[in-house]
Amino acid sequence: EVRLVESGGGLVQPGGSLRLSCAASGFTFRSYAMNWVRQAPGKGLEWLSTINGSGGGTNYADSVKGRFTISRDNSENTLYVQMSSLRVEDTAIYYCAKTMSTRFWDDAFDIWGQGTVVTVSS
Amino acid sequence: EIVLTQSPATLSLSPGERATLSCRASQSVSRYLAWYQQKPGQAPRLLIYDASNRATGIPARFSGSGSGTDFTLTISSLEPEDFAVYYCQQRSNWPPITFGQGTRLEIK
């Protein structure tokens, strides 16, 4: 079974840092680009970042560029996002999502984790 | 940045009826458009990719059409489990990848 499981969410103060993890199983992790998407309370979906299969290519939304760093460990089948300088508006459910095809690293997202909640508050 | 505008914001229909959801892009995205379904407390689920291709395991009552700037998701006959929020997403000319604001499909 293809599965993604996020962890690492929690309560953090403004200006703080947090690292989220996404454990992947059931597919050849290194062959697929991976993504982080978030959803603020009661709001829609916001793409944050994509990393290609090798980890050598990354892209970010302007809202997190310079504050968030996406990475992956293909030996551990795990995706990460290091979040720093956190703001109240970063409060959201954070999802990792698998890119559908091995050919393109910007394809649709066919598998999603259940999400992990990040709350930024003093 | 390509902006996706979904309409209507809320659609009220009864089971068995046909649902037509729209997604309009601020510039052409060719056919690089996907549709997702999200139920309360759940992660999004991919329904349609590349405008008209059903994802694995998606029932045939879901269909997508369109190209360029105008896209449609059609649910031919609504089942009770179809009432949810639907998002479109584009991957043309990225970053950024962008989502529409969503259409809430509710039971009338």
Image: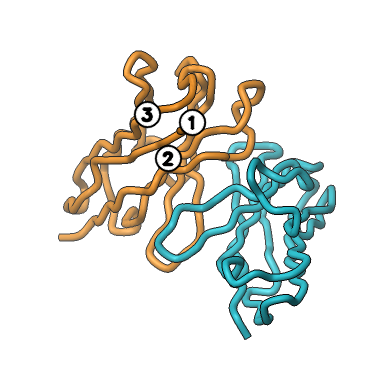
Chain colours: A orange, B cyan
Name the chain under label 1: A
Instruction: Give the residue drawn at x 59%, y 72%.
Output: B80
Q: Give the residue number, with chain letter if any, for mark 3.
A: A79
- Mark toward the start of the polypeptide (3 vs 2): 3
**What is the spatial separation of the Cα atoms under label 3 and label 2, in whole angstroms?**
8 Å
Q: Residues within 10 Å of mark 3 (few under 14, many from 20)?
A: many
Of pointers 1 and 3, the one earlier in the residue sequence: 1
- Asked if residue A91 lies left or right of residue B69, the reply is left
- Residue B15, numbered circle: none
Q: Residue at x 50, y 32 (%)?
A: A50
* Quadrant of the frame with the C terminus of chain A: bottom left
Amino acid at circle 1: Met
Vertical comparison of A75 with A5: above or below: above
Label 3 and label 2 in one chain: yes
In contact (CB < 8 Å): disc 2 and disc 1: yes
- Whether callout 1 and callout 3 share a subunit is answered yes
Residue, disc 2:
A96
Q: What secondary structure is marked by label 2?
A: strand
Q: Quadrant of the N terminus of chain A?
A: top left
The CA span between labels 1 and 3 is 7 Å
Residue A34 is tagged as: 1
Instruction: Give neighbour class at mark 1: few <14, some 14-19, many 20+ (Cα, 10 Å).
Output: many
Task: Please name the amino acid that badge 3 sits on.
Answer: Leu
Contact, mark 1 vs mark 3 (Cβ under 8 Å): yes
Circle nearer the N terminus (2, 1): 1
Tag 2: residue type?
Cys
The reply to whether callout 3 and callout 2 are in contact (CB within 8 Å) is: yes
Marks 2 and 1, Cα distance to the nearest angstrom?
A: 7 Å
At mark 1, the secondary structure is: strand
